[in-house]
Amino acid sequence: WIVPVLYNSSSRYLGDERMTHNQQLIYNAIRRAAVAGRLCPSNEVLCTITGMRSKAHISDTVTLLAKRGMFKVVRYSNSRQVFFDDCKTATPEYTTPHPRYS
């Protein structure tokens, strides 16, 4: 199978800033899931991938990437679905709207 080109700090910018290493890891993990049609990785999985301890920081980073236009996010009570221009992550089993974002 062919994996699409993923971005590194020298080729992908967020506004006037380059992506940090952890932002790249998070972006690439979510992008791979979307291309494969899998569920968006959880904050816990993204913590494991990045080596970060804070799930809240992962969530903040996903929010930052979305605000910078890298993708769009629909948040549910215990999951999220991410939409890129050409693909999206799978729809979660439970789609109860997140209380803060509904």
Image (cartoon, rainbow, N blue to C red):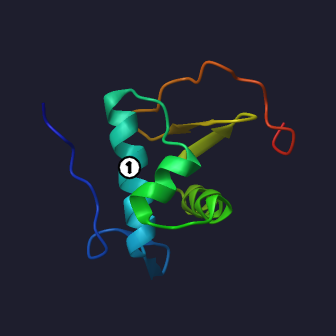
User: Residue drawn 85% across and 45% down?
Assistant: 100
Is the N terminus in the top left, top right, bottom left or bottom right quadrant?
Answer: top left
Crowd rating for badge 1 (residues with CA inside 10 Å; few <14, some 14–19, many 20+): some
**Figure quadrant of residue 95:** top right
Residue 96 appears anywhere in the view: yes
Give the secondary structure at mark 1: helix
In the image, what residue type sits under mark 1? Ala
Q: Look at the picture and state if 45 lies above or below 22.
A: above
Q: Which residue is identified by label 1?
A: 29
The residue that appears at 43% across and 63% down in the rendered structure is 50
- Residue 25 in percent (x, y) is at 38, 61
**Is residue 6 shown left or right of residue 1?**
right
Which corner quadrant of the image does residue 81 belong to? top right
Tell whether 66 sits left or right of 97: left
Res 86 seen here: no
Q: Observer-nearest residue: 79 or 81?
A: 79
Locate the C terminus and report the quarter of the image it occupies: top right
Q: Which of 61 and 73 is in front in this view?
A: 61
